[in-house]
Structure formats: structure tokens, C-alpha cells
């Protein structure tokens, strides 16, 4: 056990845990941020995606010791003082979800995409979301929602 310091959603945290623990477990079990989901544990589904220093990363396979001093953003950190992120509103407007299990990871990758490319093409959206599985088959609605958030409309 050792202490690990990093920033989560703009707040500095200190966690006493084994450095080899997955970041996902620390977020969910130590910091009570349960929006980030466990799916496969093997970088195959994308449900655990978070931003680390602004880049999408699988939190299921990322040892917490490796995020020391870095900035982590989870789906809870996308909203701003209670105001939904434009992507969150667009997903609601498009009803882009069924069970919702995949959505926190998808929102994270979509947010990173729109930050680096505010007007992505359909192909660029599909490429950015390629790491994500949605077993409910909501892909078309998800793409429409990202287009809507980008101001492109369906
Ligand atoms: S839980 Fe991390 S990729 Fe599936
Ligand atoms: S909405 Fe159910 S897995 Fe995507």
C-alpha cells in the first residue's frame, strides 16, 4: 500500500492503495465515482474509458500508480456546475441509449473527439468510437447524437 495523488474532475485526490490496482477500481470503490463501468477488463469494450490528461484511456487496465500527478476526467466531470455537457444533452435528445451501460465510455471518447475536432465527419466519429461496444445496437443514434452535439444535426 502506498499513497497516490492525482486530480479527478478538477479535484486533487490522495488514495492509499496498492499501486497495481486498476484505476477503474479506485475510481469506483475508493472515490465512489461509479459512472465509469467495468465490462470486459481486457481493453475490448470501452465501457471503462476515462480521459487522462485529455486523452481517452482504458481505466480497467491502467495501474493507478501510473496516473500520479495526472489529470483524470470521468463522465461525472463532463457536466459543468450541474449544466449538462452538449453531448449529454444531445444523447438525451436523440434517445441514444437503451440499457446505458456503454454510454459513459462513449461520452468520454466523443468529448475528446469534439475537443480536438469540433466538426467531425461521420467516418471520423465512427473511427473515434471504434473501441466501444454497444450490445443494444444503438450505433446509429449514438452517431446522430455526436453530430447533433457538434452542431451538424442528424
Ligand atoms: S472494461 Fe475496460 S475495455 Fe472493457
Ligand atoms: S445502450 Fe446498452 S450497451 Fe449500449
Image: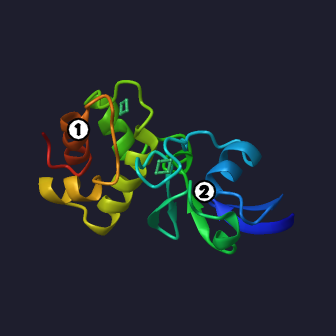
**Is residue 60 found left or right of 115 in the rendered image?**
right
Residue 58 position, x and y percent, is 49, 58
Alpha carbons under labels 1 and 2: distance apart: 27 Å
- Considering depth in this image, is 1 or 14 the residue closer to the camera? 1
Q: Nearer the viewer, mark 1 or mark 2?
A: 1
**Is residue 150 found left or right of 82 in the rendered image?**
left
Ranked by sequence position, the earlier of labels 1 and 2 is 2
The residue located at (45%, 42%) in the rendering is 104
Q: Is residue 29 above or below residue 7?
A: above
Q: Is residue 81 above or below residue 123?
A: above
**Outermost residue toward the bottom in this view:** 69
Element carrying mark 2: loop
The residue located at (18%, 37%) in the rendering is 140
Question: Can you tell which mark lies on residue 139?
Answer: 1
Residue 94 position, x and y percent, is 25, 30
Residue located beneath label 2 in the image: 9
Residue labelled 2 has its Cβ within 8 Å of some atom of ligand 1? no
Q: Can the viewer see residue 93?
A: yes
Amino acid at each position: 500500500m502506498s499513497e497516490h495523488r492525482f486530480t479527478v474532475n478538477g479535484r486533487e485526490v490522495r488514495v492509499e492503495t496498492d499501486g497495481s490496482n486498476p484505476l477503474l477500481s479506485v475510481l469506483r470503490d475508493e472515490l465512489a465515482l461509479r459512472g465509469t463501468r467495468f465490462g470486459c477488463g481486457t481493453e475490448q469494450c470501452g465501457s471503462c474509458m476515462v480521459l487522462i490528461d485529455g486523452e481517452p484511456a482504458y481505466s480497467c487496465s491502467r495501474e493507478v500508480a501510473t496516473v500520479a500527478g495526472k489529470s483524470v476526467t470521468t463522465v461525472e466531470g463532463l457536466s459543468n456546475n450541474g449544466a449538462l455537457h452538449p453531448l449529454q444533452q444531445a444523447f438525451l435528445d436523440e434517445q441514444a441509449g437503451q440499457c446505458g451501460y456503454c454510454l459513459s465510455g462513449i461520452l468520454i471518447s466523443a468529448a475528446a473527439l469534439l475537443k480536438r475536432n469540433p466538426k467531425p465527419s461521420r467516418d471520423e466519429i465512427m473511427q473515434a468510437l471504434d473501441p466501444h461496444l454497444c450490445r443494444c445496437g444503438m450505433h446509429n443514434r449514438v452517431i446522430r447524437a455526436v453530430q447533433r452535439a457538434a452542431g451538424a444535426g442528424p
